[in-house]
Amino acid sequence: MSIEFKNVDYVYAPGTPFQTQGLIDISFKIEKGSFVAIAGHTGSGKSTLMQHFDGLLLPSKGEITVAGEQINANTLSKALKAIRKKVGLVFQFPENQLFEETVLKDVMFGPLNFGFSEQKAKEQAVEWIKKVGLSEDMMDKSPFELSGGQMRRVAIAGVMAYEPEILCLDEPAAGLDPEGQKQMFEIFKEYQRAGHTVILISHNMDDISEYADDMLVLDHGHLIKHASPQEIFSDQEWVKKHYLDEPATSRLTRELQKGGFQFSEMPLTIESLVSKVANELKKKGDMDE
């Protein structure tokens, strides 16, 4: 189930003194089963773009296809339910997504809303509460009694419990400690491996380089680059020009290159970098013999 944007514009508060262009002539295609990162500085249009994936915002101009369903400026709200069953959004601030009396009820809401039986909804909720690292004794607590990191886990479980085909995440690791961040990203990567599409908004280029296989870069509402993280982070000057951070692996690779190491392509994960360095050292050792 792919996502395709064709010449999409979005205007906030059109026809008023507060009119603002949020997206400008955006066109791209995301393939089913990919892990896509959306990057760009604050105000570049990342969250605005993501809210178009399930029709939370409708384009002012242009057309969007999501999992075979069409969205345009005239799409009626009743036509969006089929799309929202296929697309799950986790927003940047989880407290805005939580509303039920207990954690269990909150996580069950999505499955129930999309037609799961009470029993199946509960089974899904319990399964995903555990998967995101929350204990069973939290299920009967109010989500508003939890820490920010725990609330984020509840919000993520609430979306993943109905297993949407497309999972959209806005800064999902914020508020989690490093171990918790890695745990959550491994869950998202496993979700992708199961055949789902994962879309991530993040300012953390290390996360993007580690997990994403495709990348969109926005700037003031324009899509300025659609390429693999490999291609984008290999162009150091372009990255600097557009105020993106370099992943730690890219910075380390460049330092190693200054020391004489040669790499056919930019390694983006620690495992890849270690493997390539080991190969280079082996080659040097073989040449010295």
Image: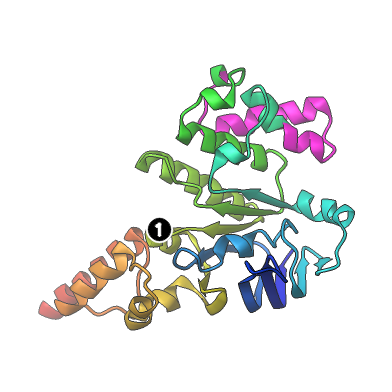
Place of residue 40 in the rendered image (x, y in percent of width and height, measured from the top left) = 47, 68
Residue situated in front as seen by the camera: 171 or 44: 44
- Write down the residue under mark 1: 204
**Is residue 136 shown above or below 200?**
above
Residue at the image position 57 percent from the left and 52 percent from the top = 169
Place of residue 192 in the rendered image (x, y in percent of width and height, measured from the top left) = 60, 55
The amino acid beneath tag 1 is Asn
Q: Quadrant of the N terminus?
A: bottom right
Residue situated in front as seen by the camera: 46 or 200: 46
Is residue 265 at least partly visible in the picture? no
Residue 179, located in which quarter of the rendered image?
Answer: top left
Q: Is residue 212 magenta?
A: no
Place of residue 54 in the rendered image (x, y in percent of width and height, measured from the top left) = 73, 57
Residue at the image position 34 percent from the left and 65 percent from the top = 247
Q: How many labels does the image show?
A: 1
Residue 242, located in which quarter of the rendered image?
Answer: bottom left
Question: What secondary structure is marked by label 1?
Answer: loop
- The part of the chain drawn in magenta is 109-136
Give the overall secondary structure of the magenta segment: helix
Q: Quadrant of the C terminus?
A: bottom left
Residue at the image position 46 percent from the left and 35 percent from the top = 149
Q: Is residue 117 magenta?
A: yes
Is residue 44 at least partly visible in the picture? yes
